[in-house]
Image (cartoon, helix red, strand yellow):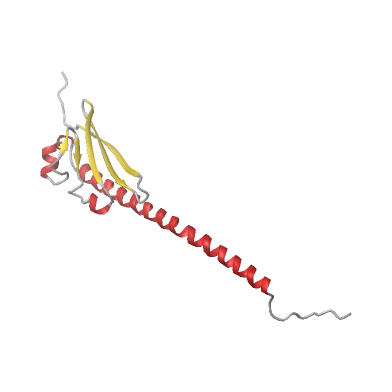
Amino acid sequence: MLVRKCRRGTSLVDVVIMLFIFGLAGIVFSASFPAAFRANKEAQEYKTATALAQRKMEQLRGLNYQSLTYGILYQNGYIDQNYTGQNYKFTSVDGVADKLPSGIGSIVVSDDFTDMKRVTITVSWASVSSINRNIQLTTYFVDRRTRKVN
């Protein structure tokens, strides 16, 4: 009996198995590509929102305790004209809506203590996956004016 040691070419079964493996790899790649793109876009939105909030925080840190009023903030171009109570918006001034989908920037100044104000900056937007997201930064301003002690 003679055994063939040399096989020439490939069989049809080998070709079908190879095509199946390459097809499966292509499907996995094409299915993961949109998810990776969406995750990248959301990361970009978080980066933009954080940069906007940090920029606004640095602008406000240049002010003193007495300057945290609507009149001074609006006059210096830090906030928009529209506001509600202690909730100021900076959506138009910094172009938040242009940089983020449905973007809104707000500043809340609250008098928590006698000589201290808490400033909370929030940037909100609707992400690629239509989920409402926000970034929030908080700092405190202390009144450093000298006082007479009785």
Give the image location of residue 95, x and y in percent.
21, 51
Q: Quadrant of the C terminus?
A: top left
Residue 133, quarter of picture: top left
Q: Residue at x 40, y 54 (%)?
A: 38
Q: Residue at x 63, y 70 (%)?
A: 16
As drawn, 115 above or below 135: above
Which of 133 and 113 lies nearest the eye of the viewer?
133
Q: Quadrant of the N terminus?
A: bottom right
Q: Is residue 119 left or right of residue 2?
A: left
Give the image location of residue 114, x and y in percent.
21, 25
Q: Is residue 12 left or right of residue 58?
A: right
As drawn, 82 above or below 10: above
Q: Residue at x 17, y 21 (%)?
A: 149
- In the current view of this chain or complex, which residue is farthest to the front? 12
Give the image location of residue 128, x and y in percent.
35, 51
Which of 119 and 92 lies nearest the eye of the viewer?
92
Count of numbered labels shown in the rendering:
0
- In the current view of this chain or complex, which residue is farthest to the right? 1
Q: Residue at x 45, y 60 (%)?
A: 33
Residue 144, quarter of picture: top left
Q: Is residue 146 left or right of residue 138?
A: left
